[in-house]
Image: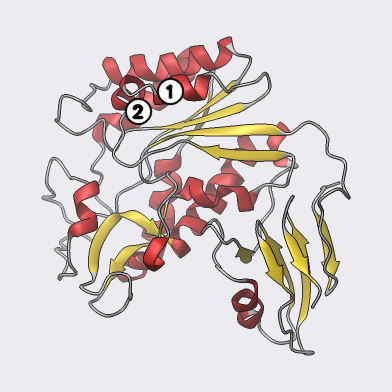
């Protein structure tokens, strides 16, 4: 039975009201496609790891250490891995996803698949296990690329500064840009008997099913004036927007549930997730309530923050589910 309490148009705080069993932490290490983002000035970019907490109940705590621009090498060299390793407790999980920046030619980030990339993945796995943790290997999420002669090296971080432009397209199917970097996580997983999540195939299938135009909706792809935070627009096929991050996080959570039975019972899905810190798809409780169609039975997950009771139309049938520490005040 899930510990998160759902109440029908009744607002209470869970603080001090629920006794919790041991909480398992999911540490996340990776690059910008997984990372938390700065939400200042209405920034709508999100990593899938930033919103993953909304896919689990309160027996699991997501602690996201993924950072923009990092490869498996730079994550180790900057002592970011050591800080995570120091925090791991027996029974905790470590979700590992690198590749986008290991492909870069810069010496501070570059690794070689089948060699140094695999060695770094082995290090994450063996050291996680040395602390009693459970490693899970992911390969890179797909880049949205429908152009056959794409650049051999794509600077994912520089895409944040690109303005909107017409897209080069000469294929109706996605063209891979990762090459052998996709196979290192799988090979190391087989070698060391680690759970492997094929994030590339999962995201490839999502984007391909949405088509050339539809798949833009997953990414930071905006025309000039379309997004107030990006007045000149942006043409970015790597990084996710709010919608895209939630689509990917939910799909990967389902894959995790299939591969890891101990986590399956803790996976859930909400169409409306509220977080002041950008971990949901709504930044305010009222905006989530307003978005719910009249007459539809709906659950809204409140991840964090203290909120005033929203105005709710009588035609709406809403159940509120509050994560630990979330508070809704009666007016």
Task: State the mark number for residue 252.
Answer: none
SS of the residue under disc 2: helix
- Compared across the picture, whether 49 is left or right of 59 comes to left
Q: Is residue 8 above or below residue 134?
A: below
Q: Residue at x 50, y 49 (%)?
A: 50
The residue that mark 1 highlights is 81
Which of discs 2 and 1 lies nearer the camera? The answer is: 1
Identify the coloring: secondary structure
Q: Report x, y in % for residue 255.
A: 57, 42
Q: Report x, y in % for residue 58.
A: 73, 45
- Residue 171 shows up from this direction: yes
Q: Residue at x 23, y 71 (%)?
A: 233
The residue carrying pointer 2 sits among few (fewer than 14), some (14 to 19) or many (20 or more) residues within 10 Å by Cα, namely some
Q: Residue at x 82, y 47 (%)?
A: 3
Report the quarter where the C terminus lies: bottom right
- Nearer to us in this view, 10 or 149: 10
Dividing the picture into quadrants, the one containing residue 330 is bottom right
- Compared across the picture, whether 120 is left or right of 310 comes to left
Q: Is residue 175 above or below residue 43?
A: above
Q: Is residue 135 above or below residue 317?
A: above
- Residue 260 shows up from this direction: no
SS of the residue under disc 1: helix
Dot 2 and dot 1 residues touching (CB under 8 Å): no
Q: Residue at x 33, y 66 (%)?
A: 216
Dividing the picture into quadrants, the one containing residue 232 is bottom left
- Nearer to us in this view, 123 or 15: 15
Task: State the mark number for residue 183.
Answer: 2
Alpha carbon of mark 2 to alpha carbon of mark 1: how far? 22 Å
- Compared across the picture, whether 184 is left or right of 312 comes to left
- Compared across the picture, whether 281 is left or right of 7 comes to left
């Amino acid at each position: 039975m899930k510990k998160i309490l759902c109440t029908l148009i009744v607002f209470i705080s869970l603080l001090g009201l629920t006794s919790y069993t041991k909480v398992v932490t999911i540490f996340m290490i990776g690059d910008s496609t997984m990372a938390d983002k700065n939400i200042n000035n209405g920034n709508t970019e999100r990593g899938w790891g930033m919103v993953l907490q909304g896919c689990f109940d309160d027996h699991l705590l997501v602690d996201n250490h993924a950072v923009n621009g990092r490869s498996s090498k730079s994550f180790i060299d900057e002592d970011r891995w050591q800080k995570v390793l120091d925090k791991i407790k027996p029974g905790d999980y470590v979700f590992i996803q690198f590749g986008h920046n290991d492909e870069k030619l810069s010496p501070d980030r570059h690794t070689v698949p089948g060699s140094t990339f695999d060695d770094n993945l082995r290090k994450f796995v063996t050291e996680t296990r040395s602390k009693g943790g459970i490693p899970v290997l992911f390969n890179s999420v797909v880049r949205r690329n429908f152009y056959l002669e794409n650049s051999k090296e794509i600077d994912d971080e520089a895409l944040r500064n690109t303005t909107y432009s017409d897209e080069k397209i000469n294929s109706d199917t996605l063209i891979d840009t990762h090459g052998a970097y996709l196979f290192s996580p799988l090979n190391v997983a087989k070698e060391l008997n680690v759970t492997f999540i094929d994030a590339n195939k999962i995201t490839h299938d999502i984007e391909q099913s949405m088509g050339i135009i539809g798949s833009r909706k997953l990414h930071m792809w905006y025309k000039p004036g379309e997004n107030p935070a990006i007045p000149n627009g942006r043409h970015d096929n790597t990084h996710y927007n709010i919608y895209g991050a939630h689509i990917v996080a939910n799909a990967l959570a389902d894959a995790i549930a299939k591969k890891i039975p101990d986590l399956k019972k803790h996976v859930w899905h909400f169409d409306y997730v509220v977080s002041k810190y950008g971990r949901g798809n709504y930044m305010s409780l009222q905006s989530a309530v307003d978005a719910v169609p009249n007459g539809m039975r709906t659950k809204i997950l409140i991840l964090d923050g203290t909120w005033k009771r929203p105005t709710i139309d009588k035609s709406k049938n809403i159940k509120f589910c509050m994560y630990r520490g979330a508070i809704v005040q009666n007016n």
